[in-house]
Every structure is written in C-alpha cells, then in structure tokens.
Image (cartoon, coloured by chain):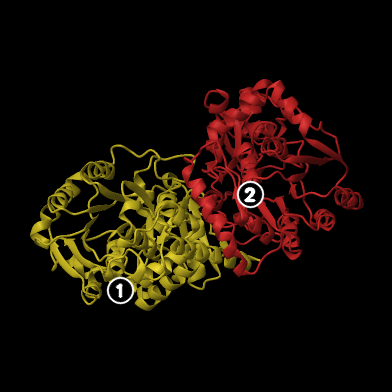
Chain colours: A yellow, B red
Amino acid sequence: MALCAAAASTATAFASSSLSASTARPRGPSSTSLPSFVGAFPRAVAARRRRRAAAPAAARRAGVTVRAEAKKKSVVIVSTNSGGHAVIGFYFAKELLGAGHAVTVLTVGDEGSDKMKKPPFSRFSELTSAGGKTVWGDPADVGAAVGGAAFDVVLDNNGKDLDAVKPVADWAKTAGVGQFLFISSAGIYKPTEEPPHVEGDAVKESAGHVGVEKYIAEQFGSWASFRPQYMIGSGNNKDCEEWFFDRIVRNRPVPIPGNGMQLTNIAHVRDLSRMLSLAVEKPGAASGKVFNCVSDRAVTLSGMAKLCAAAAGVAAVDIVLYDPAAAGVDAKKAFPFRNMHFYAEPRAAKEALGWTSSTNLPEDLKERYAEYAASGRGEKAMTFDLDDKILASVGKAPASVAV
Amino acid sequence: MAATASLKSSLLLPSPISDFSGAAVSISAQKRRSSWQPRGARVQVSAAADSKNILVMGGTRFIGVFLSRILVKEGHQVTLFTRGKAPITQQLPGESDAEHAEFSSKVQHLKGDRQDFEFVKSSLAARGYDVVYDINGREAVEVEPIIDALPNLEQYIYCSSAGVYLKSDILPHCEVDAVDPKSRHKGKLETEKLLTSRGVNWTSIRPVYIYGPLNYNPVEEWFFHRLKAGRPIPIPGAGNQITQLGHVKDLARAFNLVLGNPKASQQIFNISGAKYVTFDGLARACAKAGGFPEPELVHYNPKDFDFGKKKAFPFRDQHFFASVEKAISELGWTPEFDLVEGLTDSYNLDFGRGTFRKAADFTTDDMILDKKLATV
C-alpha cells in the first residue's frame, strides 16, 4: 500500500513536470529558452533534474523554476575558525564545487594557527583538489584576502553580531555581490510553550544575530538568513554525538538534566548544505527570507542517548536524570544541548525552496559511530569530573534503559 | 471539464501508474487555482464542483455536525446515519435561526444501528451513495457491509486517528511513520487495511486531539472546570510533555477538501493544529481563552497514586503530536485557528455559555493536592 502511494506520487510528479514542459514549449534543453551554455554543465543539469524529480508538489507550486539559474556562480564563504558551525561551510563548499561553481573559502585568522589542525580545516585539501580556493584573513577586510574578483554570492558563516558581519556585508555591497547569505542561529527565538519555532516567530531583539539579519535586509535586495541548531557529520569541529559515544563505549552512565524529554533538533550537516545550495540555485525563491536550517524531526535528549547506544551496538544505556541545581553543576558545561525544549522546524525551506530533509538519525549515527570507533578516541583515557559529581549527587545506582 | 470526467473514472479503482498522468491536468489546474488564493483565505475551492449524494456515518455529535453543514452549503445531498439518540440537528451557538432552518430542511436522516450489519448493507444498497464519510467507525467489520452495499462508491473518507502511530523518541509523527499494531486504535489500522485490500478509493484522516464547541471528550472542558472553580491545575510529570490540539472546524474543512480530490486518493493525512503545545502551556492557553488569571500549576508523579478507574489528566502522559505538512502542501489546507483563538472560540460558544458534557469531578485533583499538602 505504501509502495503504491509512493509510486503514485512519484508518477504524479513526473507527469506534472513533463506536462508543464510540453505545454510551454517542446521538450529538451536545446529547445528551451536556456542559453546554449546549459549543455556545458551536464553535471549541474543532471543534478537539477534529479532534484526536481524528487521535489514535492509544493515546490513546483511555490515557484516556477527559472532555468537561467543553472549558471555557474562565484561564491565566497567567510568561515569561522572554530565551533559547531564551521562544518557547514565545509559541506557547502564541497557541494557548490560539485555543482560546478567557483568557491573561495576565507577562514578567519592565520593558516598556520593551531586551530587549523582540527577538522574541517585539516581537510581543506578536499576543497582545493576540487578546484576551490582557500585563503586566510580578517573579515574586517575581505577585499584584501580575496582580491578584486567579482563574486555572485557571499555566505557569512562566521559572525554572531553586527561588529563581525558589517564589514563583510559592506565589502560585499561595494563589490556588487548579488546575493548575501548569513548563518544565524535558531537560538535567537524567544522561548515558547507552543513549539516548534517557525520562521516569523518572535526573536530576542538583543541577540547579535538579529541585528545582523536586520542590517543585511536593509542592504541587499537578495539576502537570506539560515538559523541552524545542532548538527552531526564528518569533519565537525565541535563534539555532538561524540559526547554520548565517549560514555557509552566506556560503559559509563549518561547523565541527562531534567526529565530527558526535552526535544532538540540534530541534523546531518548535508541537509544544511543542501538548503544553502538551493538558495544559491533559486535566489528569487530564497530572497528576503529566513530559514530554519534544521532537519524536519526532533529527538528527545533521552532518545538521542538511546540512538547513540543503538548505533554503537550496545543493548542498553544507563541514563541518569538529574537536577543541575541540586547536583551543583552548570548544565551548560555538563551537557552538550540546551536544558529545555529547543525545537525549530524547517517549514520555509520546504515551502519556498522545495527542500527536503534527508537526516535519518538511526542510520546517520551508525556512520558516525564507525568513524568514532576507527579514530581510537574510545580507547583514550578521559576524565569525567562533572559526570562523577552528578552521579555522586544522585546517590543510587543508575538503571539500564533498554534501547 | 473533459479532463475532470476522465479523472473521476480513473479514481474509481486504484489505477496503474500510467493512469495518473491523465490526472496531471486536473492536478496542475488545481495547483494553479489554489496558488491564487492567499494563504488562510476563507473561501476554499473544492475540487469536485458537482453535487454528490453523501452518506455520513454519525454526524450528530461533534465533527460531523460541522462537516455536514459545510457539505450542505457546498450543495451536496447529505444523509446522516445515526441511531437517533441525539437530535438530528441542533442549532449551534452562533448559528442564526435562518441558517439552522436552512440546514435542517436539507439534511436527511437514515435511522439505524451501524452494528446491525445486515441492516446497514440492505439500507445502503437500496439508496445508493456516491461518497461515504465514516466519522464514527472503529472496527473493520463495521465497514465491510458499507463497502459491500456500494460497489460504485466514488470515495470512502475515514476518520482514523494519530493514536495509531508507534510511540517514538523522534517526532513529529508523519504519515509514513511506523504504526503500532497493538495500539488501542488498531481497529482504525485494520479499517485502513481493509479499504486498501478491497480496492476502494479511500482517504484516511488522522486527527490528534480535537477541540472546539460541542467537544464530548473533556479536553479543554477539563481545564475550564478547574479554571472556573479557581482551582490549581494538577499536571503529571514536569509538564513539558508536548501534545497538539486541532480545532474541529479546521478538521471539518480538511474533510471537505479531500472530497473528490485526486491528491487524496489512497492517502493518509494528519490533521491538527499548526503548532504543538506543552501541558503547562495548554493550561495557560485555556486560562487566556476564558479570561481567567494565570493558573497555579501543581506537578505530581502519577506513579505515587492509584487513581483506580478515574483519569487524573485528559492527555496521554507522553509526547504526542503529528506533522500536518502533507495536508498543507498537498491539499492546500491550512489550520485557521491558532491555539488561543481556537480555545477562545470553544469557550465563547460552549463552556463560557454554561454548557459542558461532563460535570466537574475533582476527586483525583483532591487526592493529588492533599498529598502535596501533606508533604509540605
């Protein structure tokens, strides 16, 4: 039954896409209004056809695909040199290069700094071997780092406030950059008792990212802001699932604040990269919009622990729930996710860009665990001072939770 | 219009994939039509322009009361199949005398017990119907006589339940997700399977918690009783469990939008509110809706109590919410009521006028509050 429904909807997708092409003009790229250079980028065209076939009906209803957007673009990514967002620029650069665009990654600071020894920076050869340029410099003077070439798109994947982003935005404007994209944060949403956070919901006006979003909206005709939460993916600069694996492989309990039912959103970074790429491919559809840059499913904190255990091939995980105040610990230091519901949904991306989520935590965590296990990190000596303090405060032996 | 006619005939039975390309014309036309409507527009263009002979199983208690009115207004011939225990029509609060008279004069009644399968089969076969809305069906056996009686049925529209989804740490529930064959709603699942196996053009709607005026499940009413009595609201656990309410009028509109809609053929749609809500948040939203001061919330561990057969809280003690994205993107439906607006509508048209279905019973509340006092 499900197969029938899926086949039917795919058939509908193919039927209506071929119908609109045939009513408009004869089929075939050579006979459309596309300039002849489309044939020069067969990978990009093939990739677009695959994406259109996979896109839901709403994507085509939302906007007519302007075929001229298949043109190759020149993109600058201003990249942070540390933190959870660093991996976004890495995947985005790879995806753009794979689609035939020209990419320059400007990483903040010095090429020789110790920070560059960590992923994703330690893997930048993957960008250069694919034709990307990697440079280092100061976002206050982007021009000095990237030179006077013309660029179509800038992604600021670095600044958290206007102090950091304004110089980048101002340089982009002067340099005639057509589209300005910004990696913001879903952390700017005001807490709510009616999740999820959706685009348009109230944000904390004092948040640095909010100031940036307002500024780029004033400065650019074509701009978009992307608000991520947490992400997993090879090349991540910041621990995410590793925090759980560290405990699970050592047969240690996993301490979780509160009742473990807090929902969060953990996406595979390829989903974030896909969303950004779609914004580059469809600037009109993305223009002037804010996008929650997250997967389309939430997971509970306890659920994440159980999924990590299952991915590690472990039958049960000891989850110890605790009250941070009673345990005398700062939950921000003791646990990698916010101790509250922190749950945004990617509704704008689905509706405006025809984006779909591919994150599948049970499967994706298996791949993450394989890399973790191969790295030898599980065998390294580690101290768990905060965990031990929490366990001592709770007192009794933790019970196993079947995964 | 010729395309619509061929579309109808291709919808009688599940078609091989190639037949759906004929449906693409209407789908594109529908998409163009619905793209002209501003989002949230109150005028809904339904796909089936011609009048249908519709049978509603139920229709006199809650969902069907609102749905049957929409269907009659759309120009369909509507028959309600009920035992006649509740009045066939009742004037709704806010409904004018003229509107009510108009509706009463048009809607028809077929009196019977749907558990009497022989009667169901013979009475339906004698009358013939184009479309069945099964609002109160629970078990597959109840549906068999209906399908047997109506071999030319164009569409069977079934009110299922999001309660069929398998409990998960990954949410929201989506239509493609695993279902729980052991759930207390398994009859709904078996009905969906039966409809598929019999080659009927079916559509299944899975609501979450439904609310609104005339609700007979004490959802908002449970909170309103306590708020009116100025009592604290006892909430199990931390109160951060997330649930979801959908207004009955939005649900009725969704039921109407799937009628004759090729996008709904053999499809399941979750229908509920656009946003979810925590238990604590729901208590506060009910207070806002009724103009009550912010309530005192008392949290307790349900394991500390034996409530016997009584329910201490009207919601499942777990996260329970479903994505309505498929209905929004495929049907052009949008929920019009946000939570506080919808609860206000319910309060103003029902509880706030002094009407409710279940009398207040604070027995379990007192057990909880007494124990809390004792431990202070």
What residue sits 20% from the left and 44% below the top? A219
Task: Check disc 2: other Cα within 10 Å, few if <14, some if 14-19, many if 20+.
Answer: many
Q: Nearer the viewer, residue B227 or B273?
A: B273
Residue A326, picture quadrant? top left
Q: Amino acid at mark 2?
A: Val
Q: Judge left or right: residue A72 versus residue B356.
A: left
How far is the residue under mark 1 from the one under mark 2? 42 Å
Give the foreground label among 1 and 2: 1
User: Are discs 1 and 2 less than 8 Å apart at CB?
Assistant: no
Q: Judge left or right: residue A392 versus residue B241.
A: left
Identify the image quadrant of the C terminus of chain A: bottom right
| Chain under disc 1 | A
Using the image, determine if residue A152 lies above or below residue A133: above
Identify the image quadrant of the N terminus of chain A: bottom right
Residue A395 percent across, percent down from the top left:
50, 54
Q: Which mark is residue A39?
A: 1
Residue B164, picture quadrant? bottom right
Q: Judge left or right: residue A145 versus residue A316.
A: left
What residue sits 57% from the left and 62% below the top? A401
Using the image, determine if residue A313 lies above or below residue A142: below
Task: Check disc 1: other Cα within 10 Å, few if <14, some if 14-19, many if 20+.
Answer: few
What residue sits 71% from the left and 38% below the top? B68
Residue B171 percent across, percent down from the top left:
53, 54
Q: Which mark is residue B258?
A: 2
Q: Are marks 1 and 2 on the same chain?
A: no
